[in-house]
Image (spheres, rainbow, N blue to C red):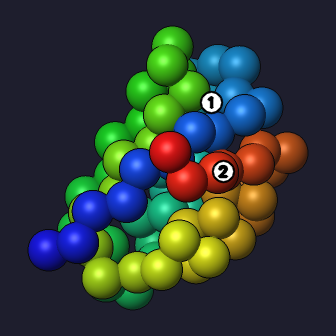
Amino acid sequence: MPTLDFTVTGMTCQHCVASVTEEVSELPGVSEVDVDLAAGRLHVVGDVTAEQVQAAVSEAGSYTAQPA
């Protein structure tokens, strides 16, 4: 299963982590999402594109995701 890693900016609390996790998890094809608030990292396992993940992160709030 393909994996993608991102650096996420704009997250400041566990609510941010929950929002990003929820939006990315809802993408069809995603099997695993891991968000690390302290490192500002997002790890996604699944059959999705970087653009789909970036759009989901933006949809979660005022966050941006850049491929790591």
Q: Badge 1: few (under 14), some or many (20 or more) residues near its Cα, within 10 Å? A: few
The answer to whether residue 56 is above or below residue 61 is below
Residue at image point 50% right, 45% down: 68
Residue sitting nearer the eye, 14 or 55: 55
* Element assignment for label 2: strand
Image quadrant assignment for residue 56: bottom right
Where is mark 2, residue-wise?
65
Residue with the most extreme left position: 1
Answer left or right for 67 relative to 55.
left
Q: Badge 2: few (under 14), some or many (20 or more) residues near its Cα, within 10 Å? A: many
Amino acid type assigned to the residue bearing label 1 in the image: His
- Tag 2 near tag 1, CB within 8 Å: no
Residue at image point 23% right, 72% down: 2
On residue 51, the disc is none
Residue at image point 53% right, 71% down: 50
Observer able to see residue 9: yes
Answer left or right for 44 relative to 6.
left
Answer left or right for 43 relative to 26.
left
Nearest to viewer (mark 2 / mark 1): 2
Q: CA distance from mark 2 to mark 1?
A: 17 Å
The answer to whether residue 62 is above or below residue 31 is above
Residue with the most extreme right position: 62
Where is mark 1, residue-wise?
15
Residue at image point 72% right, 34% down: 9
Amino acid type assigned to the residue bearing label 2 in the image: Ala
